[in-house]
Image (tube, helix red, strand yellow):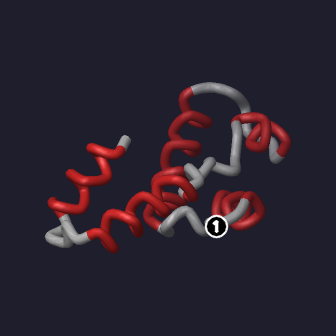
Amino acid sequence: MRDAVALAAVETGKPGAKALADLGLFIKTWVEPRFPVTGADLTRIGMTQGPEMGRALAELEAWWVASNFAPDREACLARLREP
């Protein structure tokens, strides 16, 4: 892990001790974003399982990622209901 932090610091052009400490803190505190919608959510709003549901989930997740992982479950479901 320490080597990865050092390598990242060098790649960012900031190989100083503070940069290493900042990156180490970031790595320790980072929480992986979890896509807040599942196929079960889509079933509850009336979508049937199958390729169409898979496409809808993939498109919704791409929008969520492009939105910097900010939309919560309700915002994602509202996006699905948009025409």
In front here: 46 or 22? 22
Measured from the top left, where is residue 76 in percent x and y? 67, 60
Q: Which amino acid does label 1 sit on?
A: Pro
Query: Mark 1 = which residue?
Result: 71
Between residue 11 and residue 80, name the one nearer to us.
11
Q: Which residue is at the far right?
A: 44
Residue 54 in which image quadrant = top right
Task: Please report the residue visible at 78 percent of the width from the left and 43 percent of the height from the top.
Answer: 41
Identified at 27% across, 44% down, the residue is 3
Whole-percent x, y for residue 69 in the image: 55, 62
Q: Residue at horizontal 39%, vertical 65%?
A: 21
Q: Residue 40: x, y in percent?
A: 78, 35
Between 20 and 49, which is closer to the camera in this rendering? 20
| Figure quadrant of residue 29 | bottom right
Image quarter for residue 42? Answer: top right
| As drawn, 46 above or below 27 | above
* Residue at (54, 28) in percent of width and height: 51
Q: Where is residue 50 in the image (x, y as percent from the top left)?
A: 61, 26
Label 1: state its secondary structure. Answer: loop
Camera-nearest residue between 81 and 9 = 9
